[in-house]
Image (cartoon, rainbow, N blue to C red):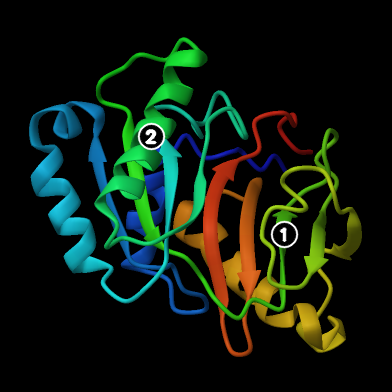
Amino acid sequence: MILKQSQNNVFTSKSDVLKFLKKKIKKSSIEPIYSFSILDWQKNKTKILYTISKKFNKTTIIVRSSAIGEDSDVSSQAGNFDSILNINPNSKINTRKSIQKVINSYQKKGNLNKNNQILIQKQTSNISKSGVIFSRVIPNGAPYYVINFEVGDSTDGVTQGKINNTVKIFRKTPLARIPKEWKKLIISVKEIEILLKNSSLDIEFGITKNTIVIFQVRPLVSIPKIN
């Protein structure tokens, strides 16, 4: 049987995918989201900075890239653009500088689309594990969940290639046989696969004491159709 990768128009930007999932997921969570385009920023800097400080008051934020087509069905630009951690949303100077740094990273890569977005989210705290889970093996699409992870509250060791702890779990393994520390993650990924109608995904995650937090979901575009 051929399992086709879904040509799902949800995959237009990082922000769009997270907003779509945030309304639907029950097995995991997504931090509060606020996003706007470069064009919006150029027209309404003051209003956007005020909204950020009001929406994320008394939290720490991360300012993230969300370019159009960054995580599409046909290409992945993972790691191409900047994301800025540990920003106080009440500091308009630091927030402005961080937003501009993300915009500058688009320009450096030759992506000057004014519809490119900037994604603001509450930064997750009290993380015990984080990493990336692929729902199939790269590059041949073999039916395993591959979890690359790090232990501790850092969230960039795996994505920057500093940490490479790996666990593989056969896709058809009964839940009762999946190690307890990974069971909630696998359950949450299976839910996302169903919602996106796609079994070939690359998902960035964090694990807190009680919750699986989803940071990013993109299609695996480097694997063939699966027999």
Which one is in front in this view, the residue at disc 1 or the one at disc 2?
1
Q: Residues within 10 Å of mark 1 (few under 14, many from 20)?
A: many
Task: Give me the residue at 25% from left, 20% from top.
Answer: 114
Please give left or right for residue 113 compared with residue 150 in the image.
left
- Secondary structure under badge 1? strand
- Kind of residue sitting beneath label 2: Thr
Residue at (31, 17) in percent of width and height:
113
Q: Which residue is mark 1?
A: 131
Viewer-proximal residue among 47 and 2: 47
Q: Position of residue 101 (x, y in %)?
A: 43, 32
Q: Position of residue 6 (x, y in %)?
A: 52, 40
Indicate the quadrant where residue 103 lies: top left
Q: Can residue 24 be seen?
A: yes
Q: Viewed as shown, does residue 117 lie left or right of 41?
A: right
Q: The N terminus appears in which quarter of the rendering?
A: top right
Percent x, y for residue 85? Answer: 52, 54
- Does residue 113 lie above or below 132 as drawn? above
Between 93 and 80, the residue placed more toward the observer is 93
Label 1 and label 2: CA atoms lie apart by 23 Å
Q: Please state which amino acid type lies under the numbered disc 1.
A: Gly
Q: Residue 111 vs residue 185: left or right?
A: left
User: Viewer-proximal residue, 92 or 201?
Assistant: 92
Residue 12: assigned label = 2
Report the side of 70 relative to 4 (left or right).
left
Give the camera-side residue of 30 and 75.
30
- Relative vertical location of residue 52 with respect to residue 70 in this rendering, above or below: below
